Amino acid sequence: MDSGDDGEALIGQALLRLQDGVAMAMSHVRQRVVQSFVVFFFVLLLLWISSFLYGSFYYSYMPKAAFSTPVHYYYRTNCESPSSFLCSYPVANISLMRNRKHVLTFGQVYRISLHLEMPDCPANQELGMFMIKTSCFSRDGSQVTSSARSSMLRYRSDLLKYLETLLFLPAFLSGATEQKQMLEVELFSDYTDDPYSPSVTAVIEILSNKVQIYSSHLYIHAHFSGLRYLIFNFPLLSALVGISSNFIFLSFLFVLSYMRLLLKVEWGPEQHRADGLLSDRDENVKNNQQEDGKNAAGDAAERLGPLQITPTNLSQQKPRLQVHNRQTRSELSESEASPGQ
């Protein structure tokens, strides 16, 4: 029976130890899971903040790389001469504002070009060279800058035209393509907008009243240099470097803040200053403790009664004792005299 009880006790102790071990293991696992979740949350938060900072920097620092708008020409047709249909040069007025914001960024170099889609007809071939004049105006109507460029259709011989017509005859008949030429005229090669008088409109005038045009578009391309060139031509690498830099900087600040908090907790209120003197708070605590000690000593002296008299108070107690002795003597003399009477 004793051996059976001992065995059950050992089994019970083993089970208790196993239960304690499992509980400790679960506690450690739970603690690790909570710590991992907190670390993952902070890392995710820092990554989001880093991405937001880089995106804000990108959209505030990088101007629009390209801008295009259709160009619609207007002209007069009420001329008296029957030889020409156009009574004035084709002129187009183009706005350089979008959503009340300037298309051109101050200090950025742009290349402005005009694309003309012209029919490959005898009238345009006989036209030869023609001039294109461009003028930019500010909000008050003053002219900021102007340029004049010449252009013409590409020359093609009659044999080349016949061969092209035979080769692309099915496409011409179906309407998939047309006999036309695309002309690109560079209006400004390195245009920089003036910050004191920014351009809000551009006026394009074709100095020919016999030109024939299908459609026209104005293209503005930014010429990036330096940091803008790297960000524009290598967007993924730039984003990786920018987000990583922000993440490292924010992590460094977070680690410093966390270490400072830990050091404050470990030092406690009794930490001495570097010069060897106590802080003001410690001195106040020390003074309060001394006052509490004096008050406790006074309370103890009062509870001890009249027998516990300190030497300092002995001189104050002597007159009271003499008065008390005199009163007792007078009372005794009166009691002795009363029986004789």
Image (tube, rainbow, N blue to C red):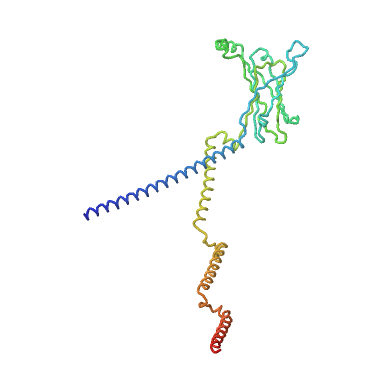
Residue at the spot 67% in from the left edge and 26% down from the top edge: 187
Q: In which quadrant of the rendered view does residue 164 lie?
A: top right
339, above or below 129, in the image: below
Image position, residue 283 (x, y; %) = 56, 65
Q: Which residue ends up furthest to the front in the rendered image?
A: 341
Q: Which sits in the foreground, 198 or 286?
A: 286
49, above or below 124, in the image: below
Image position, residue 231 (x, y; %) = 57, 36
Q: Which sits in the foreground, 161 or 3?
A: 3
Q: In which quadrant of the rendered view does residue 227 lie?
A: top right
- Residue 241 appears in view: no
Q: Which residue ends up furthest to the bottom in the rendered image?
A: 340
Residue at the spot 53% in from the left edge and 73% down from the top edge: 302
Asked whether, in this view, residue 155 is left or right of residue 144, the answer is left
Q: Which sits in the foreground, 134 or 161?
A: 134
Image quadrant in which the C terminus is located: bottom right
Image position, residue 315 (x, y; %) = 57, 81
